[in-house]
């Protein structure tokens, strides 16, 4: 009691403050095996690129909706076959599309150039499935594979036309567009190395040879 008769406040002494643990800390000390584990890290997925490849051969499933729409006009169902393989196909056809290539070698000064002969292999599989393998090219200066930007319009035209033709749709073939591009180098073309590039063959010649 103080001189005025008031009760003294019951505050803990400094030594007592250090001995009092918060409830959460006491719980962790009493149950060390139940300490919460950190949440697992979620991997960050890279955004898909429709137009770029630096590998020797690539497929473009992100362009499938445009192919499906082109065939839907004729009531033709089609599904993309995700396995890039010749195994199990029932038809195939080789042709060319257009595109641009950029050299990714930082020590090279070649830059970007256009090409009118990007090799492509269109394949049909059972159960209304298909895919198309597109082949890259190397830089004429440093010989390293470049980054290929396909011309989406010619890709969609050539692939959808071939799939329609295989199902009996009679349609005018896509126009073959000659462009002023550098001479085609077989030694730098991955399609030529794979034996599927149609270098130097005109569209009408392909149609005459088409047995599918």
Image (cartoon, rainbow, N blue to C red):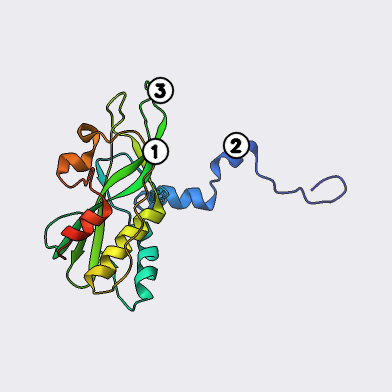
Residue 110 seen in the figure: yes
The residue at the point 32 percent across, 69 percent down is 171
| SS for dot 1 | loop
Q: Residue furthest toward the top?
A: 107
Quadrant in the picture for the C terminus: bottom left
Label 2 sits on residue: 15
Instruction: Decide: is 211 above or below 44.
Output: below
- Return the mark for residue 126: none
- Mark 3 Cα shell of 10 Å, populated few (<14), some (14-19), many (≥20): few
The residue at the point 23 percent across, 47 percent down is 201
Along the viewing direction, whichever of 116 and 105 lies nearer the viewer: 116
Earlier along the polypeptide chain: callout 2 or callout 1?
Answer: 2
- Mark 1 Cα shell of 10 Å, populated few (<14), some (14-19), many (≥20): few
Residue 15 in picture, x, y percent from top left: 60, 36
For marks 3 and 1, give the one nearer the viewer: 1
For marks 3 and 2, give the CA distance.
74 Å
Residue 175 in picture, x, y percent from top left: 36, 56
The image quadrant of residue 84 is bottom left
- Return the mark for residue 109: 3
Earlier along the polypeptide chain: callout 3 or callout 2?
Answer: 2
For marks 2 and 1, give the CA distance.
88 Å
| SS for dot 3 | loop
For marks 3 and 2, give the one nearer the viewer: 3
Residue 198 in picture, x, y percent from top left: 21, 47
């Amino acid at each position: 009691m103080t001189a005025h008769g008031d009760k003294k406040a019951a505050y803990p002494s400094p030594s007592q403050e250090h001995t009092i643990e918060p409830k959460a800390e006491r719980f962790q000390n009493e149950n060390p095996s139940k300490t919460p584990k950190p949440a697992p890290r979620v991997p960050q997925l890279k955004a898909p690129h429709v137009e770029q490849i630096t590998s020797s051969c690539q497929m473009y499933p992100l362009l499938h909706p445009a192919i499906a729409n082109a065939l839907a006009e004729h009531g033709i169902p089609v599904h993309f076959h995700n396995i890039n393989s010749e195994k199990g196909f029932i038809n195939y056809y080789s042709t060319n599309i257009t595109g641009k290539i950029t050299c990714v070698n930082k020590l090279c000064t070649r830059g970007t150039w256009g090409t009118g002969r990007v090799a492509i292999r269109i394949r049909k599989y059972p159960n209304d499935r298909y895919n198309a393998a597109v082949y890259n090219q190397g830089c004429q200066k440093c010989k390293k594979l470049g980054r290929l930007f396909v011309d989406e319009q010619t890709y969609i035209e050539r692939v959808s036309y071939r799939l329609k033709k295989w199902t009996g749709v009679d349609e005018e073939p896509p126009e073959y567009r000659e462009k002023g591009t550098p001479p085609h180098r077989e030694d730098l073309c991955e399609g030529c190395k794979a034996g599927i590039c149609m270098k130097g063959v005109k569209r009408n010649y392909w149609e005459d040879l088409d047995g599918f």
